Amino acid sequence: MNDRPSPASRFGEPPEDALPDDIREIYQTNRTKLGFVPNVFRAYARRPEHFRAFMQYHDVLMKGPSGLSRAEREAIVVAVSSENRCQYCMVAHGAALRILGKDAMLAERIANNWRTSGAPPRLMTILGFASRVNEPGFAPTDEDLAALRASGFSDDDIWDIAAIAAFFGFSNRMAGLMDMRPNDEFYDMGRGKKSV
């Protein structure tokens, strides 16, 4: 018998009919788009102010204007989450990377070990810096930033890489606190079917 209150969080989740209207609307939008409500929404719904702040910054980083492609941003999340051993973010954002990057094999290799993934040089540079942001005591030197600029990254790109890596370091740790489980649906997304 499983006494776990919810696959979304060990702290439980509020009933949907008790949620504020704006959060219920987000649930419905995702149910229409994906066919389900991601457990991260269900977990954060317990604290509506946290839900709103988390989702707003998530959307700025992952969907807002940037010199990084959506796939590059998802690759950062997958690589950092893999290093932090965050099952929820690896699985959920792995699905997004498979879809946005249109290369399920590369997405899996990044999730397993970005360093040996065979990703293109630009992406390897991005993931190398993101990984460093994820390290304790991260403090890049002026030379580190100059090397990124010499590789073609603008200051805004460098900021975005660091912000995404740092935000998902936080997200990974909160998912661990909540013992958040990936929705089953994420595992099949973006894999396509092989012909026999």
Image (spheres, rainbow, N blue to C red):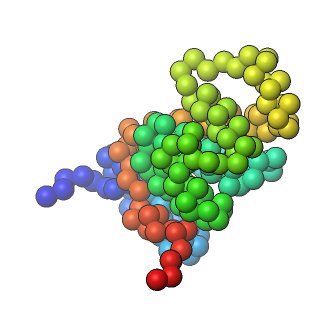
Residue at x-position 75% and y-position 34%: 159
Residue 157, percent from left and from top:
79, 39
Q: Nearer the viewer, residue 115 or 38?
A: 115
Picture coordinates of residue 95, whole percent (x, y): 53, 61
Q: Quadrant of the N terminus?
A: bottom left
- Confirm whether residue 91 shows in the render: yes
In this rendering, is residue 90 above or below 1? above
* Residue most extreme to the left: 1
Left or right of residue 152, residue 175 in this image: left
Say which residue appears at 71% left-offset and 55% top-offset: 70
Is residue 28 visible in the rendered image? The answer is no
Going by the image, does 137 lie left or right of 184? right
Nearest the eye: 92 or 106: 106
**How many discs mark residues in the rendered view?**
0
Residue under the point 70% across and 20% down? 140
Q: Residue at x 46, y 69 (%)?
A: 188
> For residue 15, which quarter of the picture?
bottom left
Question: What is the x, y in percent for residue 81?
Answer: 50, 42
The percent position of residue 133, horizontal first and vertical second, equals 62, 28
Toward the viewer: 183 or 10?
Answer: 183
Between 111 and 24, the one nearer to me in the picture: 111
Please tell me in which quadrant of the rendered image residue 148 appears. Answer: top right
Q: Residue furthest toward the bottom? A: 196
Q: Is residue 50 above or below residue 103?
A: above
Work out whether 180 lies above or below 154: below
